[in-house]
């Protein structure tokens, strides 16, 4: 006996078949999600990042011909926590591997700016009124590695360590991190010699592989007070210096950032501080003669 294809018995199978279809679709979606997550968690090859980063700077000939770099522009200082302050000034940045000089100037006596100099061997900093050091200079005097290793300034420095072959530092891929809505590659940086307590992390754009951010972080552990006016125990302090780079443009075959931001955050026992310097370069010149006395403070 042939059953009527429109019989109730066959119609009763349709809900079951629909349910199976939905289950199959759910299974496929689950597999896609699993494979997508696995792909995201897969570590990117460190050598690939380094190779593509070099290509993002310029070709081998242009990179190899880099001898000096001079950049000038405007600087805006903002104190966001700890004190009030908003100043407009100028910046001059000069590097000639491995030497570096920062000169940020503001038209005030209380805070005339920042002076950082590395002559290839020694670091020197400016002094504020009354013989005090600025927070940025204090950071560098405690941790001179950013200048001595050529890290400070990123590709604005002719001493940028990732330009060297072979790279002498120990690098480690740390995965990705989302900052300001953008996922970036993280690479840990450890020098062969230097302060072991300074944590350095480099960040790279996953599309262009340009270096767009560096974080320098260290802590001073809790310690006993040394004077009658100090408490018996001073809590730990945390220091975080961040550099950000943007608005890359071609300069004689090399891509250089025309936007540069430095931010210093200090969480200390007495007070917390957040200050930043927003810098816009209007001129970047390569391979001009630079005298040695530029890299010393007088």
Image (cartoon, rainbow, N blue to C red):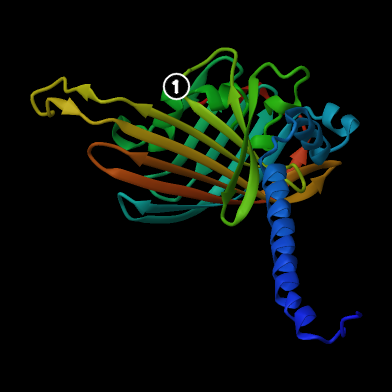
Secondary structure under tag 1 reads: loop
Residue at figure coordinates x 37%, y 28% from the top left: 219
On the image, the x and y values in percent for residue 218 come to 42, 29
Residue 246 in the figure: left or right of residue 1 = left
Residue at figure coordinates x 50%, y 48% from the top left: 277
On the image, the x and y values in percent for residue 265 come to 40, 42
Q: Is residue 126 visible?
A: no
Q: Is residue 275 visible?
A: yes
Count of picture labels: 1
Q: Image quadrant of residue 111? A: top left
| Residue on which disc 1 sits | 197
- For the residue pair 214 and 77, the one nearer the viewer reads as 214
On the image, the x and y values in percent for residue 16 come to 71, 71
Residue 67 in the figure: left or right of residue 86 = right
Residue at figure coordinates x 39%, y 47% from the top left: 274
Q: Residues within 10 Å of mark 1 (few under 14, many from 20)?
A: few
- For the residue pair 261 and 165, the one nearer the viewer reads as 165
On the image, the x and y values in percent for residue 39 come to 72, 43
Q: Image quadrant of residue 206? A: top right
């Amino acid at each position: 006996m042939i059953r009527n294809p429109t019989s109730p018995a066959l119609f009763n199978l349709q809900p079951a078949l629909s349910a199976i279809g939905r289950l199959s679709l759910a299974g496929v979606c689950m597999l896609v999600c699993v494979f997508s997550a696995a792909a995201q968690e897969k570590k990117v090859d460190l050598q690939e990042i380094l190779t593509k980063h070099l290509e993002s700077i310029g070709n081998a000939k242009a990179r190899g011909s880099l001898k000096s770099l001079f950049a000038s522009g405007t600087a805006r200082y903002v104190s966001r926590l700890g004190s009030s302050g908003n100043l407009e000034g100028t910046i001059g940045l000069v590097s000639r591997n491995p030497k570096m000089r920062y000169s940020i100037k503001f038209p005030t006596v209380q805070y005339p700016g920042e002076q950082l100099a590395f002559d290839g061997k020694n670091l020197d900093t400016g002094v504020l009124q009354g013989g005090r050091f600025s927070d940025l200079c204090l950071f560098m005097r405690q941790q001179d590695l950013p200048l001595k290793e050529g890290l400070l300034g990123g590709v604005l420095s002719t001493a940028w360590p990732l330009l060297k072959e072979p790279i002498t530092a120990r690098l480690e891929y740390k995965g990705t991190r989302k900052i300001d809505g953008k996922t970036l590659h993280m690479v840990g940086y450890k020098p062969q010699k230097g302060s072991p307590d300074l944590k350095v992390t480099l960040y790279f754009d996953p599309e262009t592989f340009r270096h767009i951010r560096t974080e320098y972080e260290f802590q001073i552990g809790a310690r006993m007070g040394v004077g009658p006016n100090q408490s018996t125990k001073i809590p730990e302090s945390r220091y975080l210096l961040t550099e950000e780079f943007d608005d890359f443009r071609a300069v004689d075959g090399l891509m250089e950032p025309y936007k540069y931001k430095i931010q210093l955050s200090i969480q200390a026992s007495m007070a917390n501080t957040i200050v930043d310097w927003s810098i816009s370069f209007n001129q970047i010149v390569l391979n001009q003669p630079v005298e040695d006395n530029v890299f010393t403070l007088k």
